[in-house]
């Protein structure tokens, strides 16, 4: 039964062609099968109950698995059991603090992390066997390798360092994923070339890596999804020689598969929040990979479009495709590839113009079978990553009709055209052709938009069974709940 659960719930191919990881994976499956999924020694048997945060009562001798998603506009958690049923969930907006004219994301993310732990129902916390976190890709932090304190302000997923691009292009292969101003490597090189005096004390972390460090206390560990845009090659399970030979290679984090147990939850946090002694913290992934895992797409040709603040596309392909000229890259998934990219169009543009309530009300008045004559390129600000990699691309949201229904129709249809252009580009570059699109993220609740997208894409488009990235992070925690491997 467990085998069917693991194959149906969790993509067994999350682990790449890495025999050690596979052996761990099979050991984990055998161990869990042997224990019948019962609590390990030292865990607490709980009575059924219901608590806040959307939890439901459970006959609890099972362990639970906590996934947290740190997206663009806010953070969410999902607490699942080993059948993948959600036992509790919740979300938090990011508190906004300013520091030196910038948003103090470090303070906001840290506060949000512990607020989410507070929101996990108290009576379920002793059941939690493992925790994982996903974050926005290429959100880059340079921190002190001892204290974890930031040495530079975090640079977000869509911020660019064009100053570093010529140097990165001079060392990386042509059109490599890192040859984009918003890549993690460009951010690293930009810092390295600045007046950074404390290079020997520094280490590079991604947003998810830093949040996980706050929980387990072992600094300098990342996963091969987050590390892709700093230059890690998941096909050889290593940083490539051209990168290791650079002076700044000294501050690169070590890299493990997503969902790998790192260490137990720190004692102070464990006792403060009431988590069990054997609660492990596992490596994470990026938000759009977590959304892909949540959607449980398993066949080549199946794709997940994350309609969150941005438009992130992941197509399961047997062929790896990389081309920075268009912002196309491939994350590894065992012997297959998640080919795609992330556009700066998406829900954040909608949120600048409409409230979520207006979106729902106006969308109901749109006839999705009717094409919109309006032709926009909806962006929040100048710059696009994919399917056109142009840091100078300007937003185009005019002419604006008087009627908001027509305006929204034009925007939704224009974003659908960008999505169609993206999937066509992946096929032109050699990926497995797309056959079916699942939708994740906040935009997946819009049935009108799904119908517009089906018409524009000429493909079946469905809302994913689970649309939240935090569910995918919880599946990673489920995979990684193996303290024996620490
Ligand atoms: N009914 C709707 N139709 C289309 N988009 C929506 C709707 N409701 C919310 N959204 C969009 O969903 C986005 C939030 O989705 P979410 O997945 O939470 O984003 P992220 O995790 O990237 O912050 C918002 O930008 C919002 O505009
Ligand atoms: O747009 C984003 C934030 O939501 C990220 O860029 C998104 O995570 C896509 O990156 P990746 O494909 O590496 O997961």
Image (cartoon, rainbow, N blue to C red):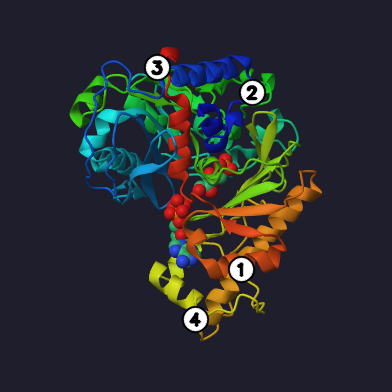
Secondary structure category for the residue under label 1: helix
Q: In whole angstroms, how far apart are the C-alphas of marks 2 and 3?
A: 33 Å
Disc 1: CA contacts within 10 A as few (<14), some (14-19) or many (>=20): some
Residues under numbered marks 4 and 2 in contact, where contact means CB atoms less than 8 Å apart: no
Residue, far left: 272
Q: Residues within 10 Å of mark 4 (few under 14, many from 20)?
A: some
Observer-side mark, 4 or 2, equals: 4
Q: Secondary structure at mark 3?
A: helix
Q: Which mark is residue 243?
A: 2
Q: Measure the alpha-carbon separation of dots 4 and 2.
A: 50 Å
Mark 2 Cα shell of 10 Å, populated few (<14), some (14-19), many (≥20): some
In this rendering, position of residue 20 left or right of residue 73: right
Q: Which mark is residue 404?
A: 4
Q: Are marks 1 and 4 in contact (CB under 8 Å)?
A: no
Residue designated by label 3: 483
* Identity of the residue drawn at 68% across and 68% down: 455
In the figure, is residue 421 to the left or right of 147?
right
Distance from Cα at disc 1 to Cα at disc 3: 45 Å
Q: Secondary structure at mark 4?
A: helix
Q: Is mark 3 within 8 Å of ligand 2?
A: no
Inter-mark Cα distance, 3 to 4: 54 Å
Residue 287, given in percent of the width and then of the height, sits at 50, 43
Classify mark 2: helix, strand or loop: helix
Would you name the residue on which mark 1 appears? 451
Of marks 3 and 4, the one in the foreground: 3
Name which quarter of the figure residue 215 lies in: top left
Query: In terms of sequence position, does the residue under pointer 1 or pointer 2 come before the other?
Result: 2
């Amino acid at each position: 039964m467990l085998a069917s659960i693991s194959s149906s719930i969790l993509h067994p191919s999350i682990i790449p062609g890495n025999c050690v990881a596979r052996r761990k994976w099979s050991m984990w499956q055998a161990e869990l099968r042997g224990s019948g999924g019962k609590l390990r020694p030292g865990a607490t048997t709980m009575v059924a109950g219901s608590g806040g945060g959307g939890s439901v009562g459970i006959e609890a001798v099972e362990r639970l698995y906590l996934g947290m998603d740190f997206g663009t506009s806010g953070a969410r958690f999902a607490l699942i059991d080993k059948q993948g049923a959600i036992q509790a969930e919740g979300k938090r907006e990011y508190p906004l603090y300013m520091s030196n004219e910038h948003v103090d994301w470090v303070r906001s993310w840290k506060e949000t992390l512990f607020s989410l732990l507070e929101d996990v129902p108290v009576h379920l916390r002793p059941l939690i066997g493992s925790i994982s976190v996903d974050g926005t890709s290429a959100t880059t932090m340079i921190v002190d390798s001892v204290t974890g304190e930031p040495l530079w302000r975090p640079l977000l997923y869509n911020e660019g360092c064009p100053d570093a691009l010529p140097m990165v292009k001079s060392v990386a292969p042509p059109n490599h994923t890192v040859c984009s101003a918003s890549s993690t490597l460009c951010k690293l090189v930009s810092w390295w070339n600045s007046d950074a005096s404390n290079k020997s004390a520094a280490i590079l972390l991604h947003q998810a890596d830093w949040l996980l460090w706050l929980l387990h206390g072992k600094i300098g560990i990342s996963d091969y999804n987050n590390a892709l845009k700093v230059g890690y090659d998941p096909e050889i399970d290593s940083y490539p020689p051209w990168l290791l030979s650079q002076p700044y290679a000294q501050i690169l984090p070590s890299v493990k598969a997503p969902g790998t147990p790192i260490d137990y939850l720190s004692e102070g946090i464990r006792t403060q929040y009431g988590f069990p002694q054997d609660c492990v913290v596992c490596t994470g992934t990026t938000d759009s990979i977590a959304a892909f895992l949540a959607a449980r797409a398993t066949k080549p040709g199946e794709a997940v479009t994350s309609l969150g603040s941005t438009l992130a596309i992941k197509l399961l392909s047997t062929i790896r495709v990389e081309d920075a000229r268009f912002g196309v890259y491939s994350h590894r998934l065992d012997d297959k590839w998640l080919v795609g990219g992330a556009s700066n169009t998406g829900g954040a543009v909608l949120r600048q113009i409409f409230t979520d309530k207006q979106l729902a009300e106006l969308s109901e008045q749109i006839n999705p079978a009717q094409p919109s004559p309006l032709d926009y390129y909806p962006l929040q600000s100048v710059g696009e990553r994919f399917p056109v990699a142009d840091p100078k691309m300007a937003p185009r949201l005019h002419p604006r009709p008087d009627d908001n229904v027509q305006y929204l129709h034009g925007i939704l249809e224009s974003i659908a055209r960008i999505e169609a252009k993206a999937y066509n580009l992946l096929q032109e570059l050699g990926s497995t052709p797309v056959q079916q699109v699942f939708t994740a993220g906040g935009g997946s609740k819009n049935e009108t938009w799904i119908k517009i997208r089906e018409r524009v894409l000429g493909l079946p488009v469905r809302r994913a069974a689970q649309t939240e990235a935090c569910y995918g992070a919880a599946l990673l925690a489920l995979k990684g709940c193996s303290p024996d491997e620490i």
